[in-house]
Amino acid sequence: MNKLKKSSSLKYRADIDGLRAIAILFVVFFHFCGFTGGFIGVDIFFVISGFLISTIIFNGLDSGSFSFIDFYSRRIKRIFPALLLVLTFSIIFGWFVLFPIEYKLLNKHIFRASYFVSNFNLLKESSDYFNNASDNKPLLHLWSLAVEEQFYIIWPLLMWLAWKFRLNVVKIAIFIAIGSFTFGLYKVFHNKAAAFYLPQSRFWELLIGSILVHVNNRKEVFLDWFKKTLNVAEAKILNLLSLLGFILIGISVFILAREKYFPGAWALLPTFGAALIIFAGSSAWFNRVILQNSILVWFGLISFPLYLWHWPLLSFAKIIQNDAPIVFIKILIFLASIILAWLTYRFVEKPIRFGNKPKKKILYLCIFMLLLGVISNDLYRNERLNVYQKNSWDLVRTDRLKPDESCNIFGINSKNIICSTNSDKPEILIVGDSHATSLNSSVYEKKVNLKTLLLSANSCLPFDKYLAQKEFKHDDCRNLTTQIKFAVKEVSSIKTIIIMTYSPEEEDFEKYGFNNSTKKNESKDLFLKGYSDFIAELISAGKNVVFVVDVPKLSHDPKLCVTRIFNKNPASDCKIGKNLVFEKEASYRKIVKDLKKINPKLNLFYSSDVFCDENYCYGKDSNNIFYYDQHHLSVAGSKKLLDSLSLK
């Protein structure tokens, strides 16, 4: 069977717009109010989109009138106008309110959004959609649009091939949906971010809508079976199905929390709920009385621009305020989102979708999107300073934290940073984790004239058989140990070895150890023994060993220590009580003292002597911010510490 039974024509259904309204309001309330489970609105959108798009495709194939050019032309007219407007707003508004490092990231996201690959970009950034850092990404929400567009690229082609070769399109849809669901179910337990962002783990939700087209076209067959089996009138069956769909969506909204393994099996609730409501049709009581309410229908009509507008406005407000906006500001942003969505729908979307000269409009839209991608990519690749934020940015500017790949002189695992700076005969070896990398940054940026060799690996200690994160594989860190031993033995010019790693707080020792069975006290003993043996080995090799006791951790992101346009009151004064720092690191500092007792020739250097006075530890002075984030040094901080070490 190469085609569906004659598909019902795609007539306008006000109840579907009402369902759209519920979906967008769920999402908006989730973002503005923390409405538990509101994120499932996106899953409802997926089902609606799959249903409508597949109806168009199947109708075209059945009638022999399907055209890829016509299909994608309609998609461009539907999606590009509002999206271009929001992206253009973001690139302009961001230029005024963001620091260049933030503006650089924004343009990266605009570039990816213009080619509909935002989901892959966000996955690559290893960003959890629900963490606080995500709030500072104004275009985070475009991941779902990217997934839809990727579906629009693949699905029409598959259906056309199935139709051309007389294959059963329904079986193909079911087969792919099961495969996609299984893939997502696996990923949600092994890589939650991948399960969330990858199209392979999301396509099944759109395919539910596609399969629903087939089911909907055979509605009478299903209803006859229900009537005979249950002896219930058709109207009551449709009402019950619609009500059941509403209940499933309601359950998913109120029981699904951020901690759940989502999407996975939990996404069956909202997707099947949406499918039941659509199948019930516009005559069902819930669809007729609730979903076709004029207010909901109106929100459904503006749902796409409202989805596009609400998150950038809220995210920009959080960035400017350095915190979540107060309730009054959120209300203003919510109202502004609705107004902008209506204006976009009325004066941008409708004239372009339904006006004259469609071919020219499509051409202009494509050119505009291409230009926006080129411009944003240029702004991303070539950092542009913002005159409005320049003074603040000069203070917060951290430059690069890590050396680039040209520094890799051994060509070993890319997770490891290997960088020889200022000489092919380094005199100082800097070893450790990412804190060692940040310490070397001022040398790499030629702010400090030292001949160094950096050997570091993120979240790895410089000795074997102990992990800074138990879930890491030992091989990930073993290369670092091998490199250090090689350098100590073979690079004769090295006279001094500087060790710097993250300072674990009390709860961190729960995560440290050899494996998941390592207890906290055992972890501390392993930490001490591993370091003492490692240091003894370096000293026995005739090296001057300096252990840099790690820098105090800030309580806030350093960007919060400076003023922004529209907000002249920084959220943090960039200082933290010295006693609080020492209290949190009491176990670590005791271990450091024990290291000195075990290895009397070890030189201890306390970073707190550089960044603290008697009462406070400081993250900045009047000219520089010393941190890249809450516990990594900036270039300025690195220079300040190395200058204090007096190694020249």
Image: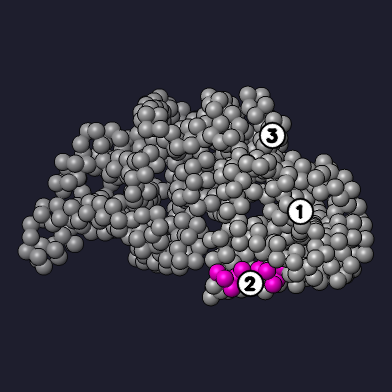
Q: Based on the displayed image, in which of its 4 quarters is residue 482 positioned?
A: bottom right
Tell me what residue is drawn at x 7 percent, y 60 percent.
Answer: 232
Label 1 packing within 10 angstroms: few (<14), some (14-19), many (20+): some
The number of numbered discs placed on residues in the rendered structure image is: 3
Residue to which mark 2 is pinned? 525
Q: Position of residue 634 (x, y in %)?
A: 70, 43
Q: Based on the displayed image, in which of its 4 quarters is residue 24 positioned?
A: top left
What amino acid type is highlighted by mark number 2?
A: Asp
Separation of marks 1 and 2 at Cα, in angstroms: 22 Å
State which tag comes first along the sequence, 1 or 3. 1
Residue to which mark 1 is pinned? 605
Locate residue 585 relative to residue 5 in the image: left or right.
Answer: right
Residue to which mark 3 is pinned? 621
Q: In front of the other: label 1 or label 3? A: 1
Q: Secondary structure beneath disc 1?
A: strand
State which tag comes first along the sequence, 1 or 2. 2
Label 3 packing within 10 angstroms: few (<14), some (14-19), many (20+): few
Rendered position, 637 above or below 507: above
Q: Position of residue 47 (x, y in %)?
A: 34, 52
Locate residue 426 relative to residue 628 in the image: left or right.
Answer: right
Q: In front of the other: label 2 or label 3? A: 2
| Residue numbers of the magenta segment | 520-531
Locate residue 247 relative to residue 137 in the image: left or right.
Answer: left
